Image (cartoon, grey):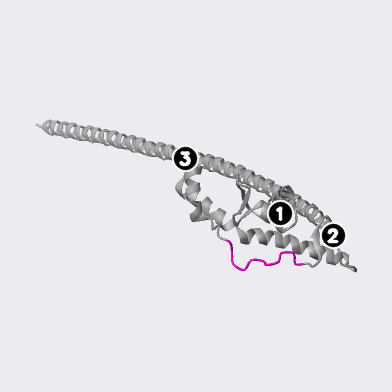
Amino acid sequence: MRRRPAASSAASTSSAAADVEETLDGSDEEEAADGYYAAKASKKKERRRQEREAQRQADEVARDSRKTKQDRYEEMRRRKDEEREAQERKLEEEAKARKAKEEEAAALEFEKWKGEFSIDAEGTTENEVQDGSQGLLFDFVEYIKKHKCVPLEDIAAEFKLRTQDCINRITSLESMGRLSGVMDDRGKYIYISLEEMKVVADYIKREGRVSISHLASKSNQFIDLEPKAQLVEDVSSVEDTTFA
């Protein structure tokens, strides 16, 4: 009988169909797996992109913040520089005005001194009068500096002045920067050099708050009140020249 081969053929066909179906199922699974991993990789890539973008934005914010702070600092420094320069200009102008005022006061003071001299010698020229006035002014200052602590009456007697005129002269010379010192309540003028004043100022700065009584008790350490050697023996260096 010849029909059995047909059955065998049918079985073979069925087996082949099963293999094809299995192959298709395997392909679907592989495609599904590939899609899953592709989606996962895409999500990871997107997450990294978002992280990079977030970092970029954070860096940009930080840069903007630093720039804002830098701009604010530079503006503050510019204003301070302008204020400092304005203050320096103001001080410079004040110093110029003060110097001009002192020079004017010195010129007026010199004219007063010159006007109080009387020259008895005949043939005395204007230049000689001026030279004599300057010499007596120098002698007046040096007399006080070398005596250090001298009664006002002694100065007045030495230069043939009234005591009040002597006080006025000393006050004017102090304003001109030619003398520096104090007049005490006993009628004495105490000359204090700029170096001695600096020593006192340094002591106060070093010690902080210092009472007047404490400073007075230390004054002998700061100020030399002894007369200087080689005093001017004759302060009226111009013969026949007297105060009017």
Of the pair 103 and 55, the residue shown nearer to us = 103
Which amino acid does the dot numbered 2 rest on?
Answer: Ser
The mark nearer the N terminus, 2 or 1, is 2
Magenta range is 227-237
- Residue 117 magenta-highlighted: no
Mark 3 Cα-neighbour bin, 10 Å: few <14, some 14–19, many ≥20: few
Mark 1 Cα-neighbour bin, 10 Å: few <14, some 14–19, many ≥20: some
Of the pair 150 and 91, the residue shown nearer to us = 150
Question: What is the quadrant of the C terminus in the image?
Answer: bottom right
Which residue is located at x 55 percent, y 60 percent? 226
- In space, the residues marked 3 and 1 are separated at their CA atoms by 79 Å
Which amino acid does the dot numbered 1 rest on?
Answer: Ala
Query: Which residue in the structure is indicated by mark 2?
Result: 118
State left or right for residue 124 relative to residue 39: right
- In space, the residues marked 3 and 2 are separated at their CA atoms by 85 Å
State left or right for residue 181 relative to residue 240: left
Which residue is located at x 67 percent, y 67 percent? 233
Query: Which residue in the structure is indicated by mark 3?
Result: 62
Q: Which SS class for mark 2?
A: strand
Task: Give coordinates of residue 109: x percent, y percent.
Answer: 78, 53
